[in-house]
Amino acid sequence: MLEKSGATTAPNPVSQFALTEEQLALAELARVFARDELASHAVTWDETKHFPVDVLRKAAGLGMGGITISEDVGGSGLSRIDAALIFEALATGCPSIAAYLSIHNMSAFMIERFGSSAQRRRFLPRLVSMEHLASYCLTEPGAGSDAAALKTRARLDGNHYVLDGVKQFISGAGASDIYVVMARSGAEGSSGISTFVVEKNTQGLSFGANERKMGWNAQPTRQVIFENCRVPAENRLGEEGVGFKIAMAGLDGGRLNIAACSIGGAQGALEKALAYVGERQAFGKKLRDFQALQFRLADMATELEAARSFLWRAAAALDAKSVEATRLCAMAKRFGTDAGFKVANEALQLLGGYGYLADYGIEKIVRDLRVHQILEGTNEIMRLIVARDLIMKDQG
């Protein structure tokens, strides 16, 4: 079971460069879970498009359904650095399942931070236990990177809002019980958006077909469709018009978690490559004895260590509510997901033709990690966030 460490929320000069015993234990717990519950099934789940809800609930039994959620509603009350360690470790077993857990945690966090006391008590205990699963609904068919241009409407009608519109690329859609939805309740632009908690059996809520995808096949991805969908007004998170801010606050943490999943997936691929070059022989010696391949392995490990250190820096800033947090989260997401995909692809190359075969598991990791450079804001949008921050500071 995940346990809160008193040393995780305010790092001192030493703990910034060395994990505490509690943090090492958290990472080991998640790594063992990934090995025992995820890794041996990952390829089969990918091939059969199986969404292992029973395994997700096992993870929740260890505290992974509400990692940063307060203890008063059953959460683990851990820090963003702790979460990064956990998601990295989980992704060594299956990046797709680790990433869904990230999205579930992000959705629960939005209710935790912006929900009323009644909303927190109503929704969070069953999300933390993963009796209920959650999905994040921002992207639309015509509004991806330009999320503030979303068209889904929320019209107030008495004590209900009536939602009409379509959300696109929603992880967990159809299987999830709770949908955290951004919809337009006011004028055009970001200030006209509000956030709603929509429950699965709400009349007027339906789902598209499961998308055929390059990766992430162990979790469903569907459209979420609202047709005269009546949502109680009491299910609105925060005030009208603050929904875009709520969505972006969720994404700060989500970007850290998806970077962690990229690093963990790539770490798993690197370990597979290390084992292979230690066994495979060519030209009379093991592959690991060729200096050219040693250099490649060294560069791969260095890239991951740099991404990991950057991720922890950004996580510490988000924990501290630093004014730099959003910029650092964007930087860490861009760097971590690019490095993760690059290292996993290099690992595949080291295995040659065997890396291309499904049985070895690396090609699945490459496919799973590719989408991390697109979701939670494309890496081009991450650069835009960073550039805007730099320019604003330069202009004083």
Image (cartoon, grey):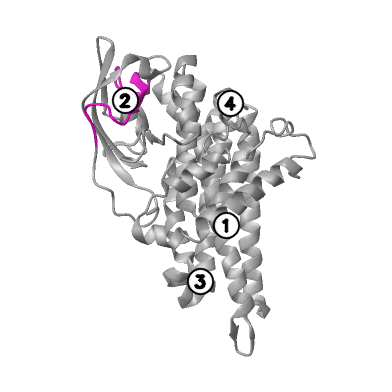
Q: Amino acid at mark 4?
A: Ser
Query: Is mark 1 in CB contact (under 8 Å) with mark 2?
Result: no
Query: Mark 2 is on which residue type?
Result: Ala
Amino acid identity at mark 1: Arg
Q: Which quadrant of the figure has residue 16?
A: top right
Residue sitting at 43 percent across and 40 percent down?
377
Residue at mark 2: 183
Q: Is residue 319 above or below residue 46?
A: above
Q: CA distance from mark 1 to mark 3?
A: 24 Å
Among numbered discs 1 and 2, the one appearing first in the sequence:
1
Task: For marks 3 and 2, give the CA distance.
Answer: 44 Å
Q: Secondary structure at mark 3?
A: helix
Provide the residue span drawn in magenta.
182-206
Q: Locate residue 47, reporting x and y percent.
A: 36, 61
Q: Where is mark 3, residue-wise?
A: 349
How far is mark 1 from mark 2, CA to CA?
Answer: 40 Å
Q: Secondary structure at mark 4?
A: loop
Q: Indicate the position of residue 91 as horizontal and vertical percent values.
A: 53, 52
Identify the disc placed on residue 128: none
Tell me: 333 left or right of 28.
left
Q: Is 313 part of what is drawn in magenta?
A: no
**CA–CA distance in space, label 2 to label 4:** 27 Å
Closer to the N terminus: mark 3 or mark 2? 2
Name the front one of labels 1 and 2.
1
Using the rendered image of the protein, determine whether residue 212 is visible from the camera's viewpoint.
yes
Q: Amino acid at mark 3?
A: Gln
For the residues labelled 4 and 3, the Cα–Cα distance comes to 44 Å
Label 1 SS: helix
Q: Which residue is mark 1?
A: 35
**Which residue ends up furthest to the right in the rendered image?**
14
Q: Secondary structure at mark 2?
A: strand
Ranked by sequence position, the earlier of labels 4 and 1 is 1
